[in-house]
Image (cartoon, rainbow, N blue to C red):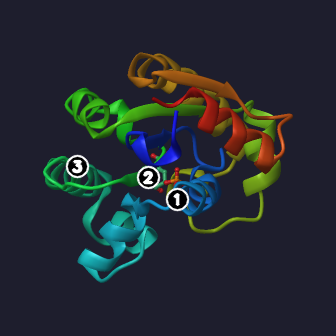
Amino acid sequence: MREESRGNVVLIGFMGSGKSTMGIRLSYRLQYILEDTDKLIETKAGMTISEIFAREGEEAFRQMETQLLQQLVEKKGRRVYSVGGGTPVRAVNRPLLKKLGTVVYLRTRPETVYERLKNDTTRPLLQGEDPLGKIRSLMAERESAYAETADVILDVDEMTTDQVVESIMGSIR
Ligand code: S3P
């Protein structure tokens, strides 16, 4: 298939699964606009995600995510969407994600996420006592929501960035 005739791509997966990096690479490769929902929310709120969680709470953030998805589904044009790790968890978001495009789930092991994010301070959900335990439990809780939303599942732990990009290119319609 010619690249310019492909549809939109939606990247989902746990924190640290590589959605933002792959979003940048894919949008460049496809010459599509990149929409990173965390960044759009931060810009609109004039606060970082951590500040939103601290000042307004997680539920307010989740409402912002749903509201943003409702706006994004109205947009025309070729786009790559990179969405926050918790976005598919809310049932109301899942049909919206599917409406946005081919949903690609970047699946990772908890240990991979832990290694990548152990020094990160920007994910409020992982700032507690036992980040690996939190990653394990959250990931287990979310797995069915991710799998249910996905059109394509890629196990990315052992893959290079180039391999992930090529696999996505090969699997999108
Ligand atoms: C979250 C993931 C984050 C961000 C927020 C909550 C989650 O996005 O939306 O911190 O619930 O998994 P990334 O997946 O881009 O880190």
Identify the mark at residue 69; answer none if there is no mark. Answer: 3
Q: Is residue 119 left or right of residue 105?
A: right
Instruction: State the SS at label 3.
Output: helix
Between marks 2 and 1, how big is the CA–CA gap?
6 Å
Image x and y of residue 84, in percent: 44, 50
Asked if disc 1 is less than 8 Å from ligand 1, the answer is no
Q: Quadrant of residue 79?
A: bottom left
Residue found 45% across the figure and 24% down from its top? 150
Instruction: State the SS at label 2.
Output: strand
Which residue, as the protein is rendered here, is positioned at the far bottom? 46
Does 148 appear above or below 166?
above
| Callout 2–callout 1 Cβ contact below 8 Å | yes
Amino acid type for the residue under numbered disc 3:
Leu
Give the residue at mark 2. Answer: 80
Residue found 57% across the figure and 21% down from its top? 140
Mark 2 and mark 1 lie on one chain; the one further toward the N terminus is 1
Instruction: State the SS at label 1.
Output: helix
Q: Is residue 78 left or right of residue 103?
A: left
Amino acid type for the residue under numbered disc 1:
Ser
Between marks 3 and 1, how big is the CA–CA gap?
19 Å
Q: Is residue 10 left or right of residue 130?
A: left
Mark 2 and mark 3 lie on one chain; the one further toward the N terminus is 3
Does 54 appear above or below 97?
below
Image x and y of residue 37, in percent: 37, 59
Image x and y of residue 5, in percent: 41, 42
Crowding near pointer 2: few (<14 within 10 Å), some, many (20+)? Answer: many
Give the residue at mark 1. Answer: 27
